[in-house]
Image (cartoon, rainbow, N blue to C red):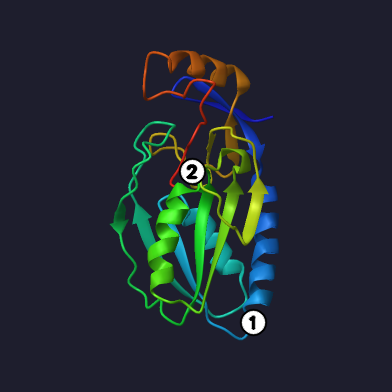
Amino acid sequence: MKARTVNGERFEVMISERRIRARIRQLARQISKDYRGTVPVFIGVLNGSFIFFADLVREVTIDCEIDFLKLSSYGDSKISSGNVRMLKELNCQVEGRDIIIVEDIVDSGLSMEYIKAPVLRQNPASFRIVTLLYKKDSVRSPIHLDYVGFTIPGDFVIGYGLDYAQRERNLRDIYRLSAASETGAAKASRSSSSGWKTPTTRKVQTTG
């Protein structure tokens, strides 16, 4: 199994590039079927979704439009501050359009709720969410997801758009923090607010 060390921590492959691409083709086929005869607007959530977004829209077989929005960054840590701010708003017309939000990962669900409310206020014809990764056990704010690539445990993950301190986004596979590294990081978190949370709290990774 391929492994790599990042910031002194060991990461192992969780999902290979081959599996990712195969799953994206499946998602694209389903979306193309569901939206046949329409021109949906795909909205990518920056920065993490940019690779997944590009690969997904190239696989769909229907006409579509694209736009992007960007939320506040979680910085260099592996946990969320819980504060969400919009850094880039939408440029597209939402009213009367079929909107598909594209996320790299949904973790806490808080950021997706932050996105959903203002979009729905603009009266889209429909609103759906597609995410490559879903940390079901980490969700704080329940939210309906229409298309999910992979449901994963609460491991910290990098690669394929997902970063660690803004790096490692360009990895072709998705890597998880190894158990040994996670144990060490959990111990370090007792003295540093930028490390893992203690075992009694949930680990939150991204804008999802």
Q: Which mark is residue 162?
A: 2
Image-based side of 170 in relation to 23, left or right: left
Can you give x and y, in whole percent of width and height, for residue 28 in the image?
64, 67
Q: Secondary structure at mark 2?
A: loop
Q: Residue at x 70, y 49 (%)?
A: 19
State whether residue 59 is above or below residue 115: below
Q: Quadrant of residue 148?
A: bottom right
Which is nearer the eye, 138 or 5? Answer: 138
Tag nearer the camera, 2 or 1:
1
Q: What quarter of the picture does the N terminus occupy? A: top right
Q: Secondary structure at mark 1?
A: loop
Which is nearer the eye, 98 or 116? Answer: 116
Mark 2, Cα crowd under 10 Å, few <14 / some 14-19 / many 20+, is many
Q: How many marks?
A: 2
Can you give x and y, in whole percent of width and height, for residue 33 in the image?
68, 76
Can you give x and y, in whole percent of width and height, for residue 99 in the image?
49, 72
Q: Which mark is residue 36?
A: 1
Image-based side of 137 in relation to 90, left or right: right
Identity of the amino acid at label 2?
Leu
Identity of the amino acid at label 1?
Arg
Q: Quadrant of residue 181?
A: top right
State whether residue 83 is above or below residue 12: below
State whether residue 183 is above or below residue 55: above
Q: Residue at x 46, y 54 (%)?
A: 112
